[in-house]
């Protein structure tokens, strides 16, 4: 989704001065040539918070930012992220592109139906390259991508193609990646595009003093030192965990004697479910519908639920589980969406997808809902089965489908045997997510085909 939620704009990144220095240095360099900076780390460590500082800092320097925040549920929707990135400039840039690039990009972004043959992948990529150059003519350009690991493949390959060719134009990338190991995943092939001009910054734990400030600024509470020390230890300096612990601690009330355990669930998943369970049943039902969708809106949730008491959604908003902006719903953190989805029974998930298939207009996403969920995260990431292959598509989405059909498809065997990647350190809980091995995702290098085309 493209919109930057208000909760991350204007919030400072406490205790991250080294990371912000790296960002500043990259933005300064961008005034001369292309650069990239990637912030990596575990879920909840504060990547998005640091990344979001790019907006204000770029504005101070007169740089233009095009941004997108990917979502797990959109990872299989072709060109979803590219559409978000280009949305603010599409109307002004597209008319300046030569045919057939203009048509190719228009079709890829589902702004128009193809006339005759489908535009080639290369035409779309050339159009993106031309658009980036045009934009960089007036001021340096930053592509800001949050959560690279969920960038849809069609967008990733197209942007990677363009970045490798922007050369010394002042186009840069500021991105985040949920990973412990930087080398593990490079969907935009930044290493090749920005050789010698790329910074990879691993985010580590926050100190006790930084967490004290984070808790005070988010929850308006100053915790007693023993509680703060325990929260720092138990969270391992992860601010998302620390905030969940602090929230639960404040609600539980009562003093903490030295040596006492925190009166709280022991795992992150336990903490998050504890928070969600306190919401009314209808709010949880609506949250499940939203968590199963790529781009939830109040109206779509209402349709899928067959009516809606908006107060239930507002309760979830007050509990800071979701944020509603211009009728669009966004979970305040992807871990909350994952938790809502994975805590529902398989039957509830199936029923939710069935209802969504009846109301979703996009054939591509509808196909995803028609396919029975096979494994928790694969389902949310767009997993499906034969239904996706047999669904009939309209001409307007044919190109999208062509990309989609090349997407990673987990086999039953892989789903069973997939190595599981901990989204939090083993010390803090058991919340885990299956992630496809890199070799599976990038098995087909269609960008190489583009190069040869
Ligand atoms: N340096 C920080 N200063 C203030 N709040 C932070 C900081 N780092 C993280 N947070 C808070 O912790 C939570 C998780 O941070 P987030 O940036 O979403 O993590 P990630 O993107 O790594 O999953 C958010 O509520 C965020 O506001
Ligand atoms: Mg994030």
Image: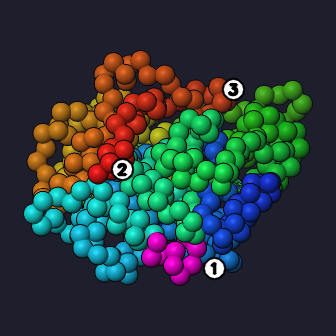
Q: Nearer the viewer, mark 3 or mark 2?
A: 2
When asked about the image quadrant of residue 213, the answer is bottom right
Q: Which badge, 1 or 3, comes first in the chain's sequence?
A: 1
Q: Which badge, 3 or 2, comes first in the chain's sequence?
A: 3
As drawn, the label of residue 427 is 3
Q: Looking at the picture, does residue 293 appear above or below residue 104?
A: above
Question: Taking 103 as reference, is 189 left or right?
Answer: right
When asked about the image quadrant of residue 56, the answer is bottom right
Residue 140 on the magenta span: yes
Looking at the rendering, the stretch of residues picked out in magenta corresponds to 133-141
Q: Nearer the viewer, mark 1 or mark 3?
A: 1
Is the N terminus in the top left, top right, bottom left or bottom right quadrant?
bottom left
Q: Secondary structure at mark 1?
A: loop
Q: Residue at x 34, y 56 (%)?
A: 79
Q: Secondary structure at mark 2?
A: helix
User: Is residue 203 among what the camera can see?
Assistant: yes
Counting labels gives 3
Given residues 291 and 154, the one toward you in this image is 154
Q: State the separation of the CA atoms marked 2 and 1.
A: 33 Å
Q: State the separation of the CA atoms marked 1 and 3.
A: 44 Å
Q: State the separation of the CA atoms marked 3 and 2.
A: 45 Å
Question: Taking 90 as reference, is 331 left or right?
Answer: right
As drawn, the label of residue 62 is 1
Given residues 72 and 234, the one toward you in this image is 72
Q: Which badge, 2 or 1, comes first in the chain's sequence?
A: 1
As drawn, the label of residue 187 is none
User: Is residue 376 among what the camera can see?
Assistant: no
As drawn, the label of residue 451 is 2
Crowding at mark 1 (Cα within 10 Å: few <14, some 14-19, many 20+): few
Instruction: Point out residue 53 in the picture as x, y percentages from the top left corner.
Output: 66, 64
Q: Residue at x 69, y 78 (%)?
A: 60
Q: Residue at x 65, y 26 (%)?
A: 426
């Amino acid at each position: 989704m493209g919109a930057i939620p208000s909760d991350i704009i204007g919030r400072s990144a406490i205790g991250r001065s080294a990371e912000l220095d790296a960002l500043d240095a990259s933005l300064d360099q961008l005034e001369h040539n292309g650069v990239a900076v990637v912030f990596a780390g575990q879920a909840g460590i504060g990547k998005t918070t640091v990344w979001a500082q790019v907006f204000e800092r770029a504005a101070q320097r007169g740089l233009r930012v095009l941004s997108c925040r990917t979502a797990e549920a959109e990872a299989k929707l072709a060109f979803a992220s590219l559409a978000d990135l280009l949305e603010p400039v599409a109307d002004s840039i597209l008319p300046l592109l030569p045919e057939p690039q203009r048509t190719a990009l228009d079709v890829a972004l589902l702004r128009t139906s193809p006339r005759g043959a489908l535009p080639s992948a290369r035409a779309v990529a050339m159009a993106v390259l031309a658009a980036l150059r045009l934009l960089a003519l007036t001021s340096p350009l930053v592509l800001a991508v949050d959560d690279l690991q969920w960038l849809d493949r069609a967008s990733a390959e197209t942007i990677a193609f363009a970045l490798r060719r922007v050369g010394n134009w002042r186009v840069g990338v500021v991105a985040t990646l949920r990973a412990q190991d930087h080398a593990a995943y490079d969907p935009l092939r930044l290493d090749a595009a920005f050789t010698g001009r790329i910074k990879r910054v691993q985010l580590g734990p926050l100190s006790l003093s930084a967490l004290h400030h984070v808790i005070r600024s988010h929850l308006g509470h100053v915790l007693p030192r023993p509680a703060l020390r325990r929260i720092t230890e138990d969270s391992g300096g992860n601010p998302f965990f620390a905030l969940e612990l602090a929230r639960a601690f404040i609600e539980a009330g009562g003093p903490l004697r030295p040596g006492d355990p925190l009166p709280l669930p022991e795992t992150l998943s336990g903490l998050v479910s504890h928070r969600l369970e306190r919401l009314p049943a209808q709010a949880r039902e609506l949250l499940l519908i939203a968590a199963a969708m790529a781009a939830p809106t109040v109206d779509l949730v209402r349709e899928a639920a067959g009516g809606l008491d908006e107060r239930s959604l507002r309760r979830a908003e007050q509990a800071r589980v979701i944020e509603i902006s211009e009728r669009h719903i966004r979970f305040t953190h992807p871990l909350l969406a994952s938790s809502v989805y994975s805590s529902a029974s398989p039957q509830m998930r199936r029923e939710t997808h069935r209802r969504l298939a009846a109301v979703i207009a996009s054939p591509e996403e509808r196909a995803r809902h028609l396919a029975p969920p096979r494994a928790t995260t694969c389902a949310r990431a767009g997993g499906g089965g034969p239904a996706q292959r047999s669904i009939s598509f309209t001409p307007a989405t044919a190109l999208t489908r062509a990309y989609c059909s090349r997407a990673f498809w987990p086999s039953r065997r892989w789903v069973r045997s997939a190595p599981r990647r901990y989204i939090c350190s083993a010390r803090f809980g058991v919340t885990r997510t299956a992630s496809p091995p890199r070799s599976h995702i990038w098995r087909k290098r269609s960008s190489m085909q583009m190069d040869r085309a």
